[in-house]
Amino acid sequence: LTYESINAQNCTILINKQIDNHGKRKDHTKTGADRYVTLPESFMAELLDYIRVKCIGPGDYLFMGYNGAHVSRHKIRDLVDKHLRLAGLEHITLHGLRHSFATRMFDHGYDVKEVQLHLGHSSMETTMKYYIHYTKGKKRKSLDDLV
């Protein structure tokens, strides 16, 4: 992510590039389509504070490694693992966090279209096939409510 990928007014981040499995920057996303990820206002405020404190400006990566390049996937993984341990949580993959986020959206009443948009899927079928899960704590609805 670069400074230019942030839209503070809309609380969005533009995703239009990717880092491949070998750490090389690609000038397109995995699907070839740009997407916007909406962030909570509170998170955007913290991100803007981070940008100000780190003196990040046009052309800069938001999260840089020691050599001024983007942070590697392995470093991100290490940071997530560290914070999971500190929080006393079990190991979960980055993609597992994505699944958990989608499941929480469904549990909080977001419909399939809203979840699809947040995840950046081009079709609702993908969202429904891979991301609709029932959590253990979710209360099962009674069919008696329908009569």
Image (cartoon, rainbow, N blue to C red):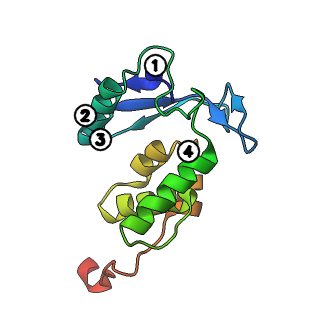
Residue 10 visible? The answer is no
Q: Position of residue 104 (x, y in %)?
A: 37, 62
Mark 1 and 2 residues: CB-CB less than 8 Å, in contact?
A: no
Reply above or below: 102 against 38: below
Residue 116, percent across and down?
48, 48
Asked which secondary structure carries label 1, the reply is: helix
- Outermost front residue: 66
- Residue 12 higher or lower than 137, as above or below: above
State the CA–CA distance, disc 2 to disc 4.
Answer: 26 Å
Q: CA distance from mark 1 to mark 4?
A: 23 Å
Q: Which residue is mark 4?
A: 121
Q: Earlier in the sequence, mark 1 or mark 3?
A: 1
Out of 107 and 142, give the one closest to the viewer.
107
Secondary structure beneath dot 2 equals: helix
- Distance from Cα at disc 3 to Cα at disc 4: 23 Å
Q: Earlier in the sequence, mark 3 or mark 4?
A: 3
Q: Where is mark 2, residue-wise?
A: 45
